[in-house]
Amino acid sequence: DAKTTQPNSMESNEEEPVHLPCNHSTISGTDYIHWYRQLPSQGPEYVIHGLTSNVNNRMASLAIAEDRKSSTLILHRATLRDAAVYYCILFSGSARQLTFGSGTQLTVLP
Amino acid sequence: GAVVSQHPSRVICKSGTSVKIECRSLDFQATTMFWYRQFPKKSLMLMATSNEGSKATYEQGVEKDKFLINHASLTLSTLTVTSAHPEDSSFYICSAGDLKRFTDTQYFGPGTRLTVL
């Protein structure tokens, strides 16, 4: 399975943008890039996903490198409620399960 | 959006007893559900894939006789931890995807925290 690499932790100030990086150098052509986040003592929550083009939704934006070997999740204005572990996951249509890595613990400072 | 519920949210049991955890997709049908286990400060580990109307598929190292999975309908999967021991204490999370409507995304339940005394 193609794997992802994320920093263990990041900090951000409240109301500032946050850029969470993810490297996936062995990504295959059919792998979608998914982002989930997990707040303490809760199940993961879907954030966004994409294949090749940049994507935007109400929660975040996803910027995908042209060679698809890396991507960046962008939170435009971090709030205290965005403090969570963020997981970058490659999802292949042939395998319906998600494989979680260690993720990035985002701390938002007031 | 799609909603997945789990029941109970928290359970404490004595060593040697069995505990059943339910996972329901509330507003969509799920032919496949997934069960994960998460230890403190660790990532989610996939335990098994629950398939409606057929046997579950277990990941390597997960005992199928200890973690019984039943997926009796398109909206309900259950995980039974049999003869629970303290080392089974963990956070159990299920997920489901509606392949008809939400291709490529999984929706997670809120999790069940199991404590075995």
Image (tube, coloured by chain):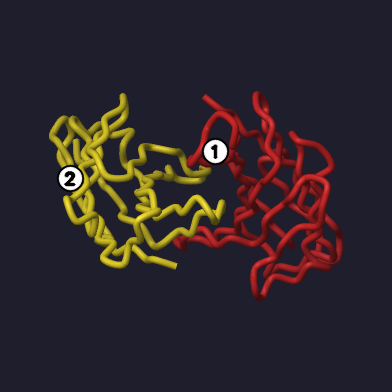
The local crowd at label 2, few if under 14, some if 14 to 19, many if 20 or more residues have their Cα within 10 Å, is: some
Amino acid type at circle 2 is His
Q: Does B55 appear above or below A110?
A: below
**Residue for badge 1:** B107
> Which chain's colour is yellow?
A
Where does the image place residue A20, in percent across and percent down from the top left? 22, 49
Amino acid type at circle 1 is Tyr
**Residue for badge 2:** A19
Instruction: Tell me what residue is drawn at x 42 percent, y 42 percent.
Output: A39
Instruction: Tell me what residue is drawn at x 25 percent, y 56 percent.
Output: A22
Residue projecting furthest to the bottom: B61
Q: Does A16 appear above or below B83?
A: above
The local crowd at label 1, few if under 14, some if 14 to 19, many if 20 or more residues have their Cα within 10 Å, is: many
Instruction: Tell me what residue is drawn at x 45 percent, y 45 percent.
Output: A40
Where does the image place residue A7, in percent across and percent down from the top left? 24, 61
The color chain B is rendered in: red
Left or right relative to B100: residue A108: left
